[in-house]
Amino acid sequence: MIQKSSDSWSEKVSVKKGNIGEEIVFNYLRDLGYVIYRPVTDGAHAFDNLCVSRDKRTIFIAEIKTKEARQYYPDTGININSYNEYKFIERKYNLPVFLFFVDAANQKIYGNFLTRLETPRVEGKCSYPLQQNGIIYFPLSNMELVAELTAEQAEAIKKHSTKNYYGAWSFNERRR
């Protein structure tokens, strides 16, 4: 029998934090009436959820990132390799990808479909989408507010955060 070591996938702080965000969004989508399919294996997977409306007329991939917006820029982002994988899946299988950002600092869930996040926009001195150091950033102004987090949900996420700051601006201020 194979024993899991203490540094197994599920024991990583980032995975625990991500699991909380994924569960919050899962419950939100389920409450909206979507049938949700999730990977059943530990470790890396192609995407977090496949969502299908009960009438089977709407289907999309839901990818959840449990992270706050950047502190000094009106944006948030994902790893460029992950972005490229989502774009590949979107093109090959003609399935739209919705990125959900679960932001404990601002107690919000926001996001949008990749095609909308990619809409070119200039915010201050930055032209979006912006690629820096292996991350692609999208402006908050290209995102829709999905839901509010409860104080309890935000605290559960913060317990697993590796950051010691929580944004100086609110989500709405950043979108201006």
Image (tube, grey):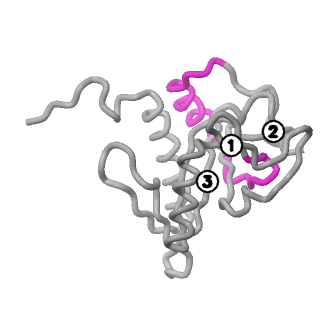
Figure quadrant of residue 99: bottom right
Identify the residue under disc 2.
74
- Residue drawn where x is 39% and y is 45% of the image: 44
In the displayed structure, 169 sits above or below 86; it is above
* Label 2 with label 3: CB-CB less than 8 Å: no
Q: Point out the image quarter for the C terminus.
A: top right
Q: Position of residue 71 (x, y in %)?
A: 76, 28
- Does residue 121 sit above or below 95 in this rendering? above
Q: How far across and how far down the image is residue 74, in percent?
A: 81, 38
**Residue 156 among magenta residues:** yes
Q: Where is mark 1, residue-wise?
A: 108
Residue 1 image point, x, y percent: 7, 36
C-alpha gap between disc 2 and disc 3: 17 Å
Mark 3 residue element: strand
Residue 99: mark: 3
Q: Amino acid at mark 3?
A: Leu
